[in-house]
């Protein structure tokens, strides 16, 4: 998975989204709202229901697209002021965002203080969680600062060949998730390994994510992130563009970057020549 946009992906049925607090339920007289047996009390101590041998945890694989911060010149006097300005364009999107640090453009022997840099990032709402690539010395410094490690990206030719193979293997167009009701503020919908079709308006503060394309047959006022696993061929289509943010494979535009000529227009958003483009569907 190519680390890109920030977006938490948690599964809950067919629509992964952050868990909500359940309403209080009446207990069944055994001390558990779901009817299961309560922990047993033995010899003055509570006995865990997992003490019989069941593991008290689960390890599962998940895909989590994250924001990639490519560091070109960390000593530039305007590095953090410019970063703060960029974050300020979409504060809700970047709040407590996990970030992958890409230092591949820096000289291999250039010093880099991961603890100090990560601390300043946190003051801007960004949380450094892992280092992409790097030499052994830099990886050791990153781990000492509490960061995880990701393998370096493949070269362009290799990555394109791999992407072609992945498109043949992964059923991006074979699964489609359809939503027929309005998407309210605060709701997040993720279509894994496929397209997302919304036949209703999307409110400000709502978030749509898909590994494939996103279609909104209504007003798009929230955030839409297509190609969430790195598919740069994905597109976003909507009947009325009023979005806070649109993103494809890690490239994004906030509302301030979208021209007035496409505001409230029927548009498609796509990647061309490494940049995000918004084209009206009706001339």
Image: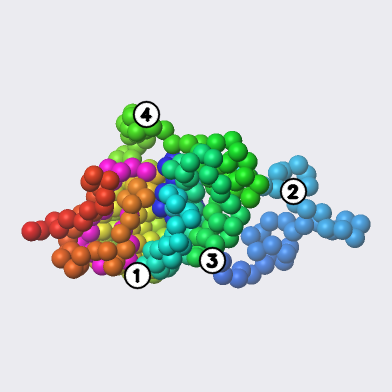
Which residue bears the numbered disc 3? Answer: 123
- What residue do we see at 47% from left, 44% from top? 106
Residue 79 vs 185, above or below: the answer is above
Residue 144 sits inside the magenta stretch: no
Q: Nearer the viewer, mark 3 or mark 2?
A: 3
Q: CA distance from mark 4 to mark 1?
A: 39 Å
Mark 4 and 3 residues: CB-CB less than 8 Å, in contact?
no
First reached walking from the N terminus: tag 4 or tag 1: 4
Q: Which mark is residue 204?
A: 1
Closest to the camera, between mark 4 and mark 3, is 3
**Residue 212, position in %: x, y?**
32, 46
Give me the disc on residue 158.
Answer: 4
Residue 63 visible in this rendered orientation of the protein: no
Give the CA distance from mark 3 to mark 2: 41 Å
Is 240 one of the magenta-colored residues? yes
Residue segment shown in magenta? 230-247
Mark 1 or mark 2: whose residue is earlier in sequence = 2
Residue underneath mark 2 = 50
Q: Earlier in the sequence, mark 3 or mark 2?
A: 2
- Which numbered mark, 1 or 2, is in the foreground of this view? 1
On the image, which quarter does residue 128 sit in? bottom right
Picture quarter containing residue 197? bottom left
Mark 3 touching mark 2, by CB under 8 A? no
Q: Secondary structure at mark 4?
A: helix
Disc 1/disc 3 C-alpha distance (Å) = 26 Å
Q: Which label is found at residue 120? A: none
Q: How many marks?
A: 4
Residue at image point 63% right, 41% down: 140
């Amino acid at each position: 998975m190519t680390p890109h946009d920030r977006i938490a992906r948690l599964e809950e049925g067919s629509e992964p989204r952050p868990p909500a607090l359940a309403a209080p339920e009446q207990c069944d007289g055994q001390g558990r709202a779901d009817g299961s047996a309560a922990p047993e009390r033995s010899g003055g101590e509570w006995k865990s229901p997992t003490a019989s041998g069941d593991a008290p945890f689960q390890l599962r694989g998940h895909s989590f697209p994250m924001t990639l911060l490519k560091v070109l010149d960390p000593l530039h006097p305007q590095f953090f002021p410019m970063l703060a300005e960029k974050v300020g364009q979409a504060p809700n999107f970047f709040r407590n965002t996990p970030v992958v640090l890409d230092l591949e453009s820096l000289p291999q022997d250039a010093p880099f203080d991961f603890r100090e840099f990560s601390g300043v990032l946190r003051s801007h709402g960004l949380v450094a969680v892992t280092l992409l690539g790097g030499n052994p010395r830099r990886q050791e410094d990153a781990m000492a600062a509490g960061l995880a490690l990701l393998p370096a990206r493949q070269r362009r030719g290799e990555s394109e060949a791999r992407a072609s193979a992945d498109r043949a293997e992964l059923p991006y167009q074979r699964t489609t998730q359809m939503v027929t009701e309005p998407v309210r503020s605060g709701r997040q919908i993720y279509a894994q390994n496929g397209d997302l079709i919304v036949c209703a308006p999307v409110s400000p503060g709502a978030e749509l994510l898909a590994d494939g394309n996103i279609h909104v047959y209504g007003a798009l006022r929230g955030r839409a992130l297509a190609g969430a696993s790195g598919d740069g061929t994905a597109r976003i289509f909507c009947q009325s563009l009023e979005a806070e943010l649109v993103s494809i494979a890690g490239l994004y535009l906030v509302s301030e970057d979208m021209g007035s000529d496409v505001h409230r227009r029927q548009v498609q958003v796509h990647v061309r020549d490494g940049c995000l483009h918004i084209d009206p569907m009706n001339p």
